[in-house]
Image: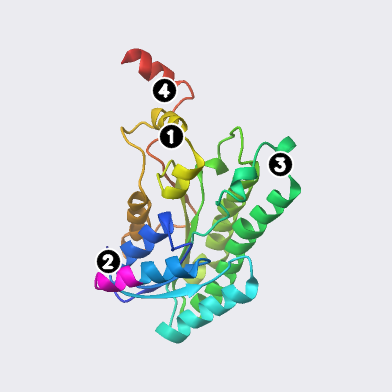
Amino acid sequence: MRGLAGKVAIVTGAGSGIGEACAKRLGEEKVKVVVADKNESTANAVAIAIERAGGVAIPIKVDIAVESEIASLVAETVRQFGKLDILHNNAAATGPDVIGHDFGIAATESWVWDVTMTVNIRGVMLGCKYALQEMLPRKSGVIINTSSAASILGDLGRSAYAASKSAVDSITQNVATCYGKAGIRCVGISPGPIITPAMKGLFTDEILDLYKRHLTLPRTGVPEDIAGALAYLVSDDASFITGQTIQVDGGMTCHAPWFAELFSKAG
């Protein structure tokens, strides 16, 4: 991708899953990567893997729900690498300890709602806030926010998660609008069914097969699909894209609700 070599990026939630794949892809593109994660051991492992592959990376332990830790994350990035060009706000409250209790509104306890909003919305807002303080004086930078198809589609659960991701979409639009004239782009990536170890832990094979039936492509997604989209969106090749949330979902959100049933009958 054009214009990525030598850039400096922070990827939150980079210790596993989508974040890990994105951090490694940026490393391959010769971006200097800060592997930020709440789990110190997994952040270390990903940073080591990037270095062994010929890239440059450092791990930083961070809880995005804590403002002082986000401020320190950005400050340490600039101290180590001299600047910040890219922020990928990817971390979210997706562990079974939270999302496993996220049901319909009538059945969801308030603590689940509060934790989800604190991490998924406040964490993204704070990431944008402190990244912008470094990007604005240089009049250059890209912020990518991980959204979800849940932000635009009703479901039988994950009510708090869906609401939080709708808010992330709004943050993306507002950052793009407020700071675009200053040279800052902000774009959302909305993954569909991406098969990560965490997703396998949350859903049965039967449910994963059901998701697959509702894709227009013949396979479910892998973290590298999101990493490829990210590499494009932060590159100079995408320099005229901002304020949008891009669906990377295998066609899940593009069709009529009866598609899967009609397709199975036609087959």
In the rendering, which numbered label is found on residue 28? 2
Of the pair 125 and 142, the residue shown nearer to us: 125
Q: Which residue is drawn at 42% across and 49% down?
A: 197
Identify the residue under disc 1.
208
Spatial distance from mark 2 to mark 1, Cα to Cα? Answer: 30 Å
Q: Do the residues labelled 3 and 4 touch (CB within 8 Å)?
A: no
Identify the residue under disc 4.
260
Q: Is residue 234 above or below residue 267?
A: below
Q: In this view, does 182 lie to the left or right of 155?
A: left
Q: Which circle's residue, 4 or 2, is located before the other in the chain?
A: 2
Identify the residue under disc 3.
108
SS class, disc 3:
loop
- Labels 2, 1: front one: 1
Q: Residues within 10 Å of mark 4 (few under 14, many from 20)?
A: some
SS class, disc 4:
helix
- The stretch in magenta equals 48-54
Q: Are marks 2 and 1 in contact (CB under 8 Å)?
A: no
Of the pair 121 and 199, the residue shown nearer to us: 199
Q: Do the residues labelled 4 and 2 touch (CB within 8 Å)?
A: no
Q: Which circle's residue, 2 or 1, is located before the other in the chain?
A: 2
Q: What is the quadrant of residue 254 in the picture? A: top left
- Labels 4, 1: front one: 1
Spatial distance from mark 4 to mark 2, Cα to Cα? Answer: 37 Å
Q: Do the residues labelled 3 and 1 touch (CB within 8 Å)?
A: no
Q: How crowded is mark 1: few (under 14 residues within 10 Å), some or many (20 or more)?
A: some
- Labels 3, 4: front one: 3
Q: Tag 1: residue type?
A: Leu
In the rendering, which numbered label is found on residue 191? none
Q: Quadrant of the C terminus?
A: top left
Spatial distance from mark 4 to mark 1, Cα to Cα? Answer: 14 Å
Residue 9 appears in the picture as rendered = no
